[in-house]
Amino acid sequence: MKTVYCVTTLLLFHRTWTSSSNRSREDSWLKSLFVRKVDPRKDAHSNLLAKKETSNLYKLQFHNVKPECLGAYNKICQEVLPKIHEDKHYPCTLVGTWNTWYGEQDQAVHLWRYEGGYPALTEVMNKLRENKEFLEFRKARSDMLLSRKNQLLLEFSFWNEPVPRSGPNIYELRSYQLRPGTMIEWGNYWARAIRFRQDGNEAVGGFFSQIGQLYMVHHLWAYRDLQTREDIRNAAWHKHGWEELVYYTVPLIQEMESRIMIPLKTSPLQ
């Protein structure tokens, strides 16, 4: 009788221990899904991810134009913006200017580069306040707009620096709203991923926000046409390692948006 009692006790203990061990493993597995491992760092994202050899700052502008005013808006932009771009007294460069073709309609997108960072931006803004032609341009432009917003950006160290290119091209601006705290991970993965997207010279520039909507990433691509875009993007999936990088970066994204854009005639990126 004592032997039976001991065996029963051992079986009950084994079942209890096994059940407890299984629950512990399940809890640990579930926690691994939701608890983010923090990599402690003592430097800002901008210092870790941005190009060290330049001090360029970028401004990305989105202007939502009244549909009936888009033609007039483009006309005055093409008359005034190149003058600022070409004036040596302004430490800034017009990188590109576009209308959205697919995505948010009746929208203009402008990308500026300030050589010298925030001091250059401040210098340009102060000078423009004294520029009568620009002030008249802004007044006329304001009557044509429904809304506008901008962001100040830095460029990723591993991306191409945007330089003028001949056309005709269409441009895709892919914008990603990342989960807070994931910018370093994104940068680490895309430092490897960008090499899969260089064959067709389609990579134009990659940026991350500093002021405005935060944890925003923008990738700018150039393609000959929509079919070329489709072919190049499909070809990436046949390269070993691309699918793994996509697998790990997708969970970092909260929202994403794609704009297909057509450059204005005066845009350095054609």
Image (tube, grey):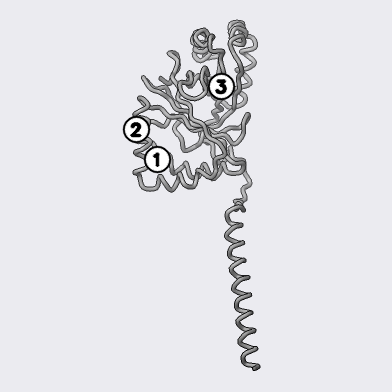
* Circle 3 crowding by C-alpha within 10 Å: few under 14, some 14–19, many from 20: some
* Distance CA(mark 3)–CA(mark 2): 28 Å
- Identify which residue is drawn at 65% across, 12% down: 129
What is the x, y in percent for residue 172?
A: 45, 27
Tell me which amino acid carries mark 2: Gly
Secondary element at image label 2 = loop
What is the x, y in percent for residue 259?
A: 48, 26
Question: Foreground residue, 179 or 126?
Answer: 179
Question: Foreground residue, 257 or 136?
Answer: 257
Question: Foreground residue, 189 or 57?
Answer: 189
Q: Which residue is mark 3?
A: 62
Q: Residue furthest front?
A: 1
Secondary element at image label 1 = helix
Report whether 145 appears left or right of 71.
Answer: right
- Identify which residue is drawn at 60% across, 19% down: 148
State whether residue 160 is above or below residue 9.
Answer: above
Tell me which amino acid carries mark 1: Arg
Q: Which residue is mark 2?
A: 200
- Identify which residue is drawn at 37% across, 42% down: 237
Quadrant showing the C terminus: top left
- Identify which residue is drawn at 53% across, 19% down: 107
Tell me which amino acid carries mark 3: Phe
Frontmost of labels 1 and 3 is 3
* Circle 2 crowding by C-alpha within 10 Å: few under 14, some 14–19, many from 20: few
Secondary element at image label 3 = strand
Q: Which residue is mark 1?
A: 195
Report whether 243 appears left or right of 257.
Answer: left
